[in-house]
Every structure is written in structure tokens, then in C-alpha cells.
Amino acid sequence: MRLNFSRLNAGGWIFLSIFSPKLVVELGMGDGTLLETLAKCDRHSTYIGIELNNEQCVQARSRITLSNVIIMNSSFEDIVPTFLDESIDQFIAVLPDPALIDEKSEERWKPFYRSAYSKLKKEGRLRLVTELTDELLQPVSDDRYSAWADWLKSCFISLGFTPVGQQEGAPRQYLSRCINQFSGDPERIRMITLDLLKQ
Ligand SMILES: C[S@@+](CC[C@H](N)C(=O)[O-])C[C@H]1O[C@@H](n2cnc3c(N)ncnc32)[C@H](O)[C@@H]1O
């Protein structure tokens, strides 16, 4: 059966929560390259990709034929609050748009991650891959990078998350269009991967 919902109703959601061993949600999945890779390696779990851009969703739907993938063409800010509380095993956010992660718009994006936290099961995780660039496009110094990493962690701690993993760059097995682009200039675009746990 191919699941291809644009929106899950409560019944569908309860069905998935009961029958899928794991529910993983990718926020802003782009063309779904990463979602496809992860879903291929873990056929018993359900992978839900949410993406605002219609063209990217059309592209992903035409390419991905896996029965354990659901693609939702919508804003994750609208969709995530409709999920059942404590129903999600993992959220993945790879290179979210600046408005949804940067320092200037902290007050705008924090309520969204607070809502995502409430949707995670206990021991569920948010894996966040994000990037720091210099406004003048100069290389990012180690001091600046580490102050930014500390600020980022403190934001998520204030939302209830416990940081349980941190590495510079994206995980080696994570391939996506934007990771490929951003990896081309590692001195000016410094990425971080944070694993954030709900205890
Ligand atoms: C920088 S791209 C990263 C895409 C993908 N994760 C990758 O690594 O290739 C950010 C993506 O988030 C999507 N996006 C931005 N705001 C969104 C929202 N509120 N809901 C769903 N998708 C959103 C954009 O359309 C874009 O595809």
C-alpha cells in the first residue's frame, strides 16, 4: 500500500501510531533525498516528509515509491501541532530556513520547537543539522562557532530538550541537496549536528 496523504486525520494517525514501530518526521524535506535514503534502510518504520514547496513534493512523489514514506505538502508549523502528543520517535530538521533557526528570529521559532517537543515520545529525539555563516562571508572562527553552538544548545535546553550528541558538520550518511551545496565551503559555512533528547 502506498501512503500518500496530504493530511492525516485522527484515525489515520492513531493507526500509524499503533502499527508503525517507529514514526520519523523530516521537517522541510526538500526533494526528499534524505527521507528516501533513511526509509530504504528501515522498512518497518514510517517516514513522514513535510515540505512547503509544491514542486519539491511533486518531484519527491514521482521518485519515491516506498510504501513506508508519506509526503505532506504543507507547512510543518501547521501540521506538527495537529499530531498526537507523545506519538513521534524522531524529528529531523536538516538546514532549516534561517527564519526557523537563527538568532534574530528566536522568538518566532521557539514556539514551534516547543510544540514538536510535546509531540515526541519519551526518549524521542530531534536531530538538527544547521549552519553558521559570517555576515561578511568571512571564514567563521572557532570561538564564534563554539559560542553559537552553546547558544543553540541553551535554546533547546530552555525548551526541555537534553543535548545528547554534537558534531561539526552533517552526519556522514546524510546526503541532501543542501548538505551537498553547503559542504563546498566548510570554512565559511560551518555546520553542526545536534541530537536533542526528550527525557
Ligand atoms: C534550506 S532547504 C533544506 C532542504 C532539505 N532539508 C535539504 O537538506 O536539502 C529548507 C527547506 O525547508 C522548506 N521549508 C521552509 N519552511 C517550511 C515550512 N514552514 N514547512 C515546510 N517546509 C518548509 C523549504 O521549502 C526548503 O525546501
Image (cartoon, rainbow, N blue to C red):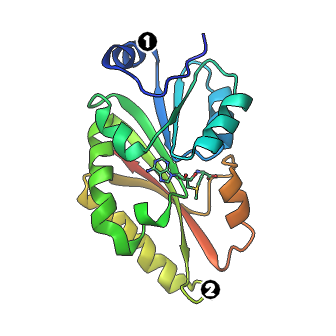
Left or right: 98 with respect to 161?
right
Pinpoint residue 141: horizontal percent, then vertical percent.
56, 86
Q: Amino acid at mark 1?
A: Phe
x 75%, y 69%: residue? 184
Horizontal arrangement in the rendering, residue 133 relative to residue 163 (left or right): right
Q: Secondary structure at mark 1?
A: helix
**Residue at the spot 32% in from the left edge and 31% down from the top edge:** 83
Q: Is residue 25 above or below residue 131?
A: above
The residue at the far front in this view is: 54
Single out the mark in the foreground, 2 or 1: 2
Distance between the alpha carbons at the discs numbered 2 and 1: 48 Å
Residue 138 horizontal/vertical position (percent): 63, 89
Q: Is residue 199 visible?
A: no
Read off the residue under disc 2.
137
Task: Tell me the SS state at disc 2.
Answer: loop
Seen from the viewer's position, the closer of residues 143 and 112 is 112
Residue visible at 38% across and 73% down in the picture: 103
Q: Quadrant of residue 31?
A: top right
Residue 33 in the image: above or below residue 161: above
What residue does disc 1 label?
Answer: 19
Are the residues tagged 2 and 1 within 8 Å (C-beta)? no
Q: Amino acid at mark 2?
A: Leu
Specify whether residue 105 is in view: yes
